Image: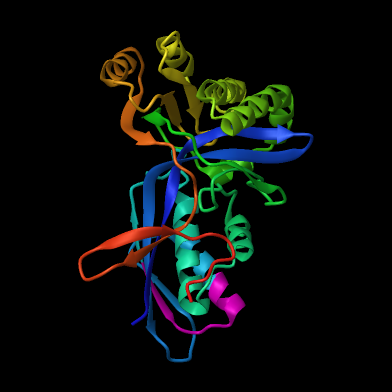
Amino acid sequence: MQEVILRVPGSCGELVQGTINGQDFLISCPINLYTKVKAKLVDYKLGENKVLINQKAPKTKAAVKKLLQLYNFKSKVELEIDSELKAGIGMASSTADISAATAAVMLLVKGEINFDLLKNICLSLEPTDSVFLEGIRFFDHRQGKKDFLLAEAPELDILIFKEKGIVDSINFNQTQKLEALNDLKSLEVKKALEFVIQGLKTNDKQLLAKGATISSLAHQNILFKKNLDKVLKLIQNKKEVYGLNIAHSGTLIGVLIAKNFKAKNLVERIKKNTELEYLNRVQMISGGLERKIFNGRSTSTWRKIARNSSSK
């Protein structure tokens, strides 16, 4: 029985998201929490392709079925999803599930990953994060027309908090007024983008966080976070606390901090003075697919899969 295990990181929302000169884009903020997918070809008998998943995952099933139809490959595929990501709050859980499962089946069937096809399948189902692609990227999350690497992730940690409730990202992105509201904040988004790109390319975490904070505040007229201003006041004038970011179509607020910052007191202050739930302290990382490689009976490692690479 053939088997492939892949993982894709989730995100703590985005560093920037919006529209500039009619171009929709986001810059995802990948973190070291993952969706892992084990994919197996259960049999090789010709017939109707069938996708079995260990949990309810209609978009992931639709993606894999679409792939099998494009490949004209008829067999039974079994998927086991194991995720550390919460759904509906802005952790890119859906993108991670879909991309990891689809890429794993690509490896099973073709022995390599067609990243352009993978991206197109993801975008055909919903607005998509760039967490399955290498590095930190400028990414058109609606149509995929613009997609390029900005830099690798800087070394910083993030304190993740969430407001109450969840957000349906598909419904959010279909809001009739969204285009007009994005246009209204485009100047702030452009300023935020410039700071984030400069911060990434010079490894200046203060500049990076300044841009992310500007994008977060500019988004308040689109998806209001009642605790955002309170958090901003609580983190001001702290040398090792750089700023904050948000999930632009979710409920997350991230506090960007130095890796050696002792955060216990700050976390308690934020919990005491806001209505936020504290989730985790994570690391910002570069995005990308990783495959589990077994080195022996009891040891294994995760290996990044670059574009144009093959498993053969």
Q: Is residue 19 above or below residue 239?
A: below
Corner quadrant of residue 1: bottom left
Corner quadrant of residue 68: bottom right
Q: Position of residue 308 (x, y in %)?
A: 59, 65
Q: Position of residue 147 (x, y in %)?
A: 67, 48
Residue pushed farthest left? Answer: 298
Q: Position of residue 122 (x, y in %)?
A: 57, 58
Q: 258 or 104, which is in the foreground?
A: 258
* Image position of 17 (left or right of 277): right
Residue visible at 59% across and 21% down in the picture: 214
What segment is highlighted magenta in the picture? Answer: 66-79
Q: Is residue 80 above or below residue 181?
A: below
Q: How many marks?
A: 0
Residue visible at 25% across and 70% down in the picture: 296
Q: Is residue 77 magenta?
A: yes
Residue visible at 49% across and 48% down in the picture: 287
